[in-house]
Image (tube, rainbow, N blue to C red):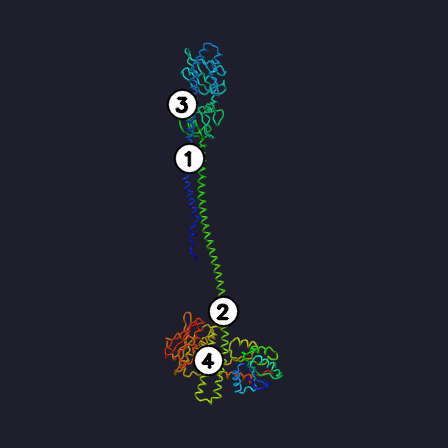
Amino acid sequence: MPEKDPTFEKSGNPLLAVFLIVSIALVLGFFGYYYFRTQIYKVKLDHYAGISAIAHLKYGELQQWRSERISDADFFSSSPAIKSMAWQIRNGNDTLTMHNQFISLLSRMSRNHRYENILLTDHNGRIMLSLVPEGSQLDSTSMATLQTTLKEDKIVFGDLHYSKALNRIHLDVIAPVHLDEGSPAVLVFCINPKYFLYPLIQSWPSPSKTSETIIVRKEGDSVLFLNEIRHEKNTALRLKFPLSREDLPAVKALKGDTGMISGRDYRGVKVFADVRPVKGTSWFMIAKIDTREVYADMITRFVLLSILMAMLVSIIAISFALAYNSRQKATFLQLFLKEKELRVSQEEIVKFNQELENRVETRTEQLKTANQELEAFAYTVSHDLRTPLRAIDGFSAILAEDYGDRLDEEGVRITRVIRQNAQKMGKLIDELLNFSRLGRSDMMNTPIDMRELAENSFEELVPAENRQNMKFNMGNLHPVSGDPGMIRQVWMNLFSNAIKFSSHRRNPEISVGSRMEDYRVIYTVLDNGAGFDMKYADKLFGVFHRLHGENEFEGTGVGLAIVHRIVTRHGGSVWAEGQVDKGASFSFSLPK
Amino acid sequence: MKTSGRYDAVDILIVEDNPQDAELTIRALRKQNLANQIFVVEDGEEALDFIFSKGQYEDRNGLKLPKVVFLDLKLPKVSGLEVLKAIKEDKNMKKLPVVVVTSSGEDPDIKTAYELGANGYVVKPVEFDAFYNSMTQTGMYWLMVNESPR
């Protein structure tokens, strides 16, 4: 089972990353929201401050302008030249000369429309001199102002009013001219607010879509707009609203509010406004901006902020994604490398396998060759060794037969010895060939009736009629699968051993039995013969190993080796127990 | 060792290169008075010459064939199996009984011999008594019991 790859584990759950991103987004969102709220407040304050500043500026300028006009009036009304002119005209002197003097004195005052006209009148308002030819009379409002001037004996700033004669809005600054005797003359400075005043008021120092400054005054139970306003035409001295319009900043101003207020303007639009009374006049100044513009600004900021936030989050998300991606890449690279390694190993294994196969083939070939050589050897042995043996035995027999009568006892014995040895050698060769053939030959695997096989084998060795004193006990032998020919050899060898080693007994007894175990059947041949010393038990089954001398019992020592080989080839085992002179039991097992 | 001269009424042709084996075989057969005429050839080539009346045995032509051939497998010049093959593939000769008598009890030889048409296969025992019995019984069968082809 392959162990878990730690790198793969670490590259982590994509869900975790998503969770992290979402949390970060939420946190940023919260911060953004609070920041936004602070920003709104700040923006509001900024705008308030801005508007207030502008209002303040305008106010200053307005007052400055007023004081300039008043100082002009003051200067000229106290000028000796003017006084002299007034005196002279009152005394009926040549107005033309006075006129020229007047003009030369005041002409520069009319430059740039500072004053539309400057009039010198008597205390009744009758025009004595005028810079610019004009109508003969002052209009009613101007007259009223004149009278106020004389009554209060000071310079008076008239109010804006509509002059029918001039067909425009008009404003006077009137100053008394004190003469040495008699009633004073009056100097009237005529101003067209279109130049200087209105522009002063209406200009806005910063580019703004909706902001404006307005001056108003109370007229009865209404508020009157004194200048042209931004969003409507022909409003100067015409547009008025009842004082019941309480959310109008103008009305609020009239009611006494000062500073930053909010309300709805003449369009019904929500506005922030700075309102203040213009000291020394009956005017009120309103510097206002649509709340929407302020908010638009805020919205812009908010949008910018959101975009910034979004960008931040995106950047974070992208970095996560990139990190994740690179981790994935690293993981995949690792996996890929591991796979490559694996493949290389697999290829190596295949190659190795192939090599092994080749080696096995070579070995098999070698073994086949060896086997074949062995077969050839066996063939040679079988053929070439037997022939001389036959000659030895045969000619010894002929010797004994044909010349036996010429040989003495010793000679006969010697011949016999020669024959015996030749025969023994023949048997040995046969058994050795058999033994070697057993290792090479193909084995059959068929069911064997062991009882029948054992009985037949014993019968072949000792036919029933020859078993005089011998007792042969055959138990019930379990059947088994194997090579019948080979198993027969096993029985033959074991029986011939049992017979051989118990033949010297008066009552030789041989018993055969079997017992069943879990995975094998065990067969036992028991005899009451010479037995053997247990300490040589493991030598029993070796080739040529004998535990008895040739004098005691004849034998080649190959028989048991044959038994061992056959049983081993069947997958079983063979063992023996014995006691010297008490008999022996030989057992072999065969798999079920 | 060859028997003397006359080879026209040969009962048994023994093809055997080992003189001792040949001697033992003849002794056994003679003891039982089984064969009057025994002829021995010592190699495969001579065997074929004899049977097919060739070479030095040209003048056997027309003479009666032996009643049986005892053929050893291990022979110089032409091998036993080759001789067997030559005999059994000849349409005139194949009726000639051939018994393979050899020291080798190896399976391939037995199989091949029968496949080539051997009439019998006898392994020569080492022990003389057994050898004696083997030879006499084989001889008895082929000369006394068996009906020879005419």
Instruction: Please tell me whether mark 3 sits on a helix, a strand or a loop.
Output: loop
- Residue hosting label 1: A40
Residue type (three-letter) at the residue carrying disc 4: Met
Name the secondary structure under disc 2: helix
Instruction: Name the mark nearer the viewer: 2 or 1.
Output: 2
Residue contact at pointers 3 and 2, CB within 8 angstroms: no
Question: Same chain for marks 3 and 4?
Answer: yes
A515 over A214 or under it: above or below: below
Picture residue at 40% right of the left edge, 15% below the top: A153
Q: Which mark is residue A279?
A: 3
Which circle marks residue A237 in the picture? Answer: none
Task: Residue A167 in the image: state x and y as whole percent.
Answer: 50, 19
Q: Which residue is mark 2?
A: A366
Q: Residues within 10 Å of mark 2 (few under 14, many from 20)?
A: few
At label 1, counting other C-alpha atoms closer than 10 Å, the crowd grade (few under 14, some 14-19, many 20 or more) is some
Label 3 or label 2, whichever comes before in sequence order: 3
Say if labels 3 and 2 share a chain. Answer: yes
